[in-house]
Amino acid sequence: MTRILVIGAGLGGLTLAHALVRAGLDVRVFEADDGTGERTQGYRIGLAPPAMDALRASLPPRLYDLAEATSGSLTGPGLLFDERLTLLSSDLPGPEESRAFDRQVLRQVLLGELGDRVAFGKRLKTFTDDDESVTAFFADGTSATGEVLVGADGGNSAVRRQLVPEVQLVDADLCGAMGRTPITERFRELVPGRGTMVKGPGITLMLGRMEFDREPSEAAAELVPGLSMPRRESYVRWVLLVPPATVPAREDARELVLDLIDGWHPDLRDLIGSADMSAVGRSKVFDRPMPPWPVSRVTLLGDAAHQTLASGGNGAMTAMQDAVRLSALLAEGRDLLEALEHYQHDLLERGNAAVEVGKQALRRFVPVAGEAR
């Protein structure tokens, strides 16, 4: 039986693992992190119908039911306010059929039923590829051998650095401060629909509601007994995008944002001040579109191949689509390298299109690096 080695246990890599298991293929996932602890990564994402279709095609039915039960509605108006909460528009464009997911909750769902197919604390150092197999070597001195190796290890992918070394990460000239604030009736009124944008002088604050249809730990106890799931209360996710030159070196996103929105409406300042988690980060992008590479037993998936800006779920959806397509091709029984060649063609077409979608979305908030301001 063909064994597939997946490097990275993010949303894309885990979706691929489930799809491969469902197709009757042998898979092992290797994650550099030591455990399943909290990742910020924007906290909340919206998944459009194609992503939901990919999850439905990949997950065992009860895990899909749990994913759906722990998601939230993204229906209702998209609002635009100024910094004093004067309503400017109630018709911001946005997807009507998407569902909101907490990234960490969804990742726990995706880890369900994979068991010892996932190994943590496995940081890839290098890999070797020959005519018969590919071997991954890890920093802890261990190795693993299979017939295919998939780099699903994110934008800073160790697999991509070896496979396509000419493609480099560069600064996107974009900085974001983000946070998560437990929801209250007062804060819920700020985001009554699918999202809210607040335009202030030179900066934009984006708010998104993550209101679980069912509290995740309680839903898991009923639908998938034995699955470890954090208790998670509903919250408002906020993101402030600002040009990096305006951002002093600081780790506390709450204090940074409060300084930048001095004089804004008290409800907005209290929302930021009440955050229970926050972070500041700079975005990276590839210095060129991902080119084709010589087809071998090694390939890429998700952000390792198509790092998207301001994805809002665009990147995760594309990675999930990658996963479904790759698993289907590998399960067809055709020549392995022929299957991987077909996948690479689809991956680059879909991925480069997703990058363009991210750029177009970002233009609503700040100029993209290299473009006229």
Image: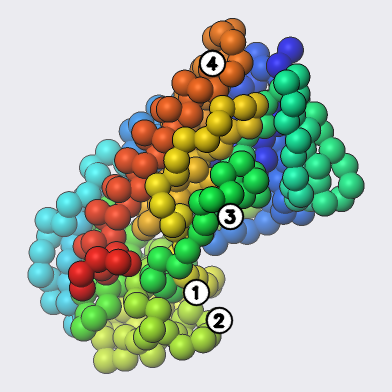
Residue behind mark 3: 156
- CA–CA distance between discs 2 and 3? 21 Å
Front one among 264 and 306: 306
Amino acid at dot 1: Val
Kindly report which numbered mark, 2 or 3, lies closer to the viewer in this rendering: 3
- CA–CA distance between discs 2 and 4? 48 Å
- Sequence-first tag of 1 and 2: 2
* Image x and y of residue 161, in percent: 61, 49
Marks 1 and 2 in Cβ contact (< 8 Å): yes
- CA–CA distance between discs 3 and 1? 18 Å
Residue behind mark 1: 280
Q: Residues within 10 Å of mark 3 (few under 14, many from 20)?
A: some
Amino acid at dot 3: Asn
Marks 3 and 4 in Cβ contact (< 8 Å): no
On residue 338, the disc is 4
Q: Residues within 10 Å of mark 1 (few under 14, many from 20)?
A: many
Kindly report which numbered mark, 2 or 4, lies closer to the viewer in this rendering: 4
- Sequence-first tag of 2 and 3: 3
Position of the N terminus, as image quadrant, is top right
Amino acid at dot 2: Glu
Kindly report which numbered mark, 3 or 1, lies closer to the viewer in this rendering: 3
Front one among 89 and 357: 357
Classify 179 as above or below 135.
below
Kindly report which numbered mark, 1 or 4, lies closer to the viewer in this rendering: 4
The residue shown at (37%, 35%) is 350
- Sequence-first tag of 3 and 4: 3
The residue shown at (65%, 14%) is 24
Kindly report which numbered mark, 3 or 4, lies closer to the viewer in this rendering: 4
- Sequence-first tag of 2 and 4: 2
Residue behind mark 2: 251
Q: Quadrant of residue 331?
A: top right
